[in-house]
Amino acid sequence: MSATDASAADEFRRALGHVPTPVAIVTAVVDGVATGMTVGSFASVSLTPRMITFFVDDASTTWPKMSTSPTFVVNVLGHDNGPLCRTFSGRGDRFADVAWRESADGDPILLESALSFQCRMHSTQRLGDHVQVVGTVTATEVHRATMPLVYHRSTFLDLGRAAQDLDARSLS
């Protein structure tokens, strides 16, 4: 990559930092082992059929294992799940102190998450330096009604606090 290309990539990354993104943890069981990773690119694709998508960086060391699973769960995080997000972004046993139960397909549903989408793999496609994963949703669960965890400009936005502030102002 030339210096000009690197500079353009850095500028693009800084610009994208101004776009808020939802945070989710994708989980699956691979060879009998619970596996998971944080993604910051979750979105809906279609209502009929029910489909979702997320993107995985080529540098991910977790995705090559997870990509072999025919099923997975997208656990969408609540505003207070920053520590959980960091756990699944790091190395080591990500499930060590995390409460979870099995989905109908045996994949981990994180009990602290706000909601979950149980999915069957629909397709993957390499796009630039990422892989787009599309899943067909087989079940959804809302675990708790809360504001989402949103990543913006290299930090988490506390929308839970923002909602409390709005509620307090509307009462006064």
Image (cartoon, rainbow, N blue to C red):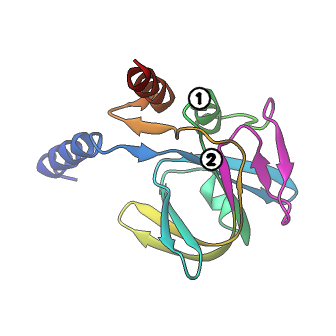
The mark lying in front, picked from 2 and 1, is 1
Asked whether residue 32 is in view, the answer is: yes
Q: Position of residue 28 (x, y in %)?
A: 74, 57
- Residue at left offset 38%, top offset 21%: 169
Q: Which residue is mark 1?
A: 80
Magenta residue span: 96-117
Q: Is 110 located above or below residue 48 in the figure?
A: above
Nearest the viewer among 112 and 47 is: 47
- In the rendered image, residue 115 lying in the magenta stretch gets the answer yes
- Per the image, label 2 sits on a secondary structure element best described as strand
Closer to the camera, 58 or 158? 158
Check if residue 6 falls in the magenta segment: no
Of residues 5 and 122, the one drawn nearer to the viewer in this rendering: 122
**Precedes in sequence: disc 2 or disc 1:** 2
Tag shown at residue 118: none
Measuring from the top left, give residue 41's x and y in whole percent: 46, 54
What residue type is disc 2 on?
Met
- Residue beneath label 2, please? 37
Residue type at mark 1? Asp
Where residue 19 sits, quadrant-wise, is top left
- Secondary structure under tag 1 reads loop
The image shows residue 33 at horizontal and vertical percentages of 84, 52
Is residue 3 shown left or right of residue 1?
A: left
Q: Position of residue 59 (x, y in %)?
A: 49, 51
109 in relation to 105, above or below: above
Mark 2 surroundings within 10 Å by alpha-carbon count, few (fewer than 14), some (14 through 19), many (20 or more) = many
Residue at image location 69% in from the left, 48% down from the top: 36
> At x 44% / y 71%, what residue is drawn?
126
Q: Quadrant of the C terminus?
A: top left
- Residue 22 against residue 74 in the figure, above or below: above
